[in-house]
């Protein structure tokens, strides 16, 4: 006799490991069990398509000053209370205005726009994994690079597969305690740390972002512990961006991050051995620029998202003043 | 400007500028019925990767 209901399935793409009955969706709202099989509801259906500067991702050590076509679909694996893109990340795919843009059209649009890479960003790109993977593969065939702007909430097997076609990532390391992760984003810390290390092991260029939210994750002790972990395991060469919080979504009651807190976080990270530490979302700050860790000269002068000067030899990745190697992809 | 401020100033603008308010509403409606970009009403049905069937 045929059962009335199809079997339950478990999605193993991200650490949420959602179990879905027939016609149920996972936490991300865009993956569904239909008849015992998993389907993506957002393949080729982005709700955001823009050309951004690379610095906006933010990636400061990856093709600086170039344009990057950036796409997102609805949905996210987490539910951060301060999400800056909550209108699309916390939406059902039926609620967003989607384009019909298969991978080939994304790559064509990137080339037409003069972009050198494609970013999977704004929401959490892991939710549109299949669309992202196919687009990445086509982009490589056409000489473009791929950038994954992610919360790092992905299981090892899909990440290994993704790394075959992904060149760089900016991972949002939201805090450094399990309690903060659970309270603010509804996720766990350890899988994110594991993903960061796996990305590095698989040869991706990795930069990290930590958005500092006043009273939530601005404790200098936590920032120090996080910096120690990064320096020890990910390496002191990993660029780190401390980003300014602006009131949004469920944290409209909190003030923007005071500048002193960001500068203090930068100092702590540098004391712990991280060589390239930036202050983000603060246009005009000196700490948007890249300095040589040896001779201290300014190598990339940035104002906002603009690159005004560039003193790294793209062939050798060396500082033009003293020859020190600077971690990054410069050509 | 944060989103709430943007909303408030937009409302104030519309209140003070009835003509432009009406024009904006009409152009908004026009855009809705004759979108310049190709919109897809449906969702995709693409087989997904990384899942397993559970027994029982
Ligand atoms: S990708 Fe979506 S459906 Fe799959 S485990 Fe994560 S949240 Fe659940």
Image (cartoon, coloured by chain):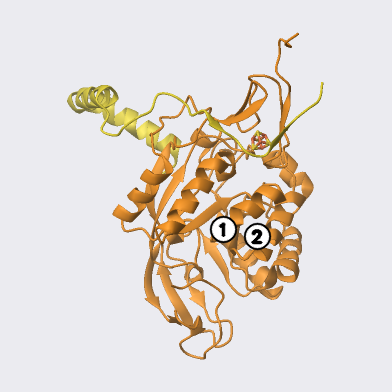
Q: Which residue is mark 2?
A: A199
Instruction: Looking at the picture, tell me which residue is in the foreground, B31 or A109.
Output: A109
Mark 1 lies on residue: A169
CB under 8 Å between discs 1 and 2:
yes
- Chain coloured orange in the rendered structure: A
Circle 2 — which element?
A: helix
Q: Residue at x 76, y 63 (%)?
A: A225
Q: Residues within 10 Å of mark 2 (few under 14, many from 20)?
A: many
Residue A302 at x, y percent in the picture? 42, 69
Image-quadrant location for residue A144? bottom left
Classify the position of ligand 1 by quadrant: top left, top right, bottom left or bottom right. top right
Residue B51 percent across, percent down from the top left: 69, 35
Q: Is mark 2 within 8 Å of ligand 1?
A: no
Position of the C terminus of chain A, as image quadrant, is bottom left
Residue A156 as seen in the image, left or right of residue A101: right
Q: In this view, which residue lies farthest toward the left?
A: B19
Which residue does the image show at 63% across and 73% down from the upper left? A237
As drawn, is A322 to the left or to the right of A307?
A: right
- Image location of residue A188, percent across then percent down: 75, 45
Chain B palette colour: yellow
Residue A146 in the image: above or below residue A62: above
Image position, residue A281 (x, y; %):
49, 56
**Of all residues shown, which one is farthest toward the front?**
A1
Of all chains, the one bearing label 2 is A
Count of labels shown?
2
Work out whether A281 lies above or below A34.
below
Image quadrant containing the N terminus of chain A = top right
Tell which subunit mark 1 falls on. A
């Amino acid at each position: 006799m045929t059962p009335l209901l199809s079997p339950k399935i478990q999605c193993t793409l991200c650490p949420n490991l959602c179990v879905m009955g027939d016609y149920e969706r996972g936490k991300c709202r865009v993956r569904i069990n239909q008849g015992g099989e998993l389907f993506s509801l957002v393949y080729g259906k982005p709700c955001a398509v823009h050309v951004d500067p690379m610095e906006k991702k933010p990636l400061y050590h990856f093709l600086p000053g170039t344009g990057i076509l950036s796409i997102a679909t609805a949905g996210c694996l987490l539910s951060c209370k301060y999400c800056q893109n909550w209108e699309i990340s916390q939406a059902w795919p039926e609620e967003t205005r989607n384009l019909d843009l298969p991978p080939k059209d994304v790559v064509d649009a990137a080339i037409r726009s003069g972009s050198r890479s494609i970013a999977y960003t704004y929401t959490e790109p892991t939710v549109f994994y299949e669309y992202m993977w196919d687009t990445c593969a086509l982009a490589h065939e056409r000489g473009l690079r791929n950038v994954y702007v992610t919360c790092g909430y992905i299981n090892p097997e899909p990440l290994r597969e993704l790394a075959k076609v992904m060149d760089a990532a900016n991972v949002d390391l939201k805090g450094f305690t399990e309690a903060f992760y659970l309270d603010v984003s509804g996720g766990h810390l350890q899988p994110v740390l594991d993903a960061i290390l796996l990305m590095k092991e698989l040869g991706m260029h990795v930069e990290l972002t930590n958005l500092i939210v006043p009273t939530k994750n601005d404790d200098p002790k936590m920032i120090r512990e996080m910096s120690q972990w990064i320096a020890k395991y990910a390496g002191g060469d990993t660029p780190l961006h401390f980003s300014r919080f602006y009131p949004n979504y469920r944290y409209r009651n909190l003030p923007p991050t005071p500048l002193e807190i960001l500068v203090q976080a930068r100092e702590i990270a540098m004391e712990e051995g991280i060589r390239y530490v930036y202050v983000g979302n603060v246009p005009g700050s000196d700490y948007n620029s890249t300095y040589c860790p040896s001779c201290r000269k300014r190598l990339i002068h940035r104002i906002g998202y603009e690159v005004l000067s560039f003193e790294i030899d793209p062939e050798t990745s060396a500082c033009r003043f003293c020859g020190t190697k600077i971690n990054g992809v410069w050509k | 400007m944060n989103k709430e401020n943007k909303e408030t100033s937009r409302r104030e603008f519309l209140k003070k500028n009835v003509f432009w308010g009406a024009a904006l509403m009409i152009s908004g409606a026009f855009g809705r019925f004759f979108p310049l970009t190709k919109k897809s009403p449906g969702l995709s049905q693409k087989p997904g990767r990384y899942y397993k069937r559970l027994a029982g």
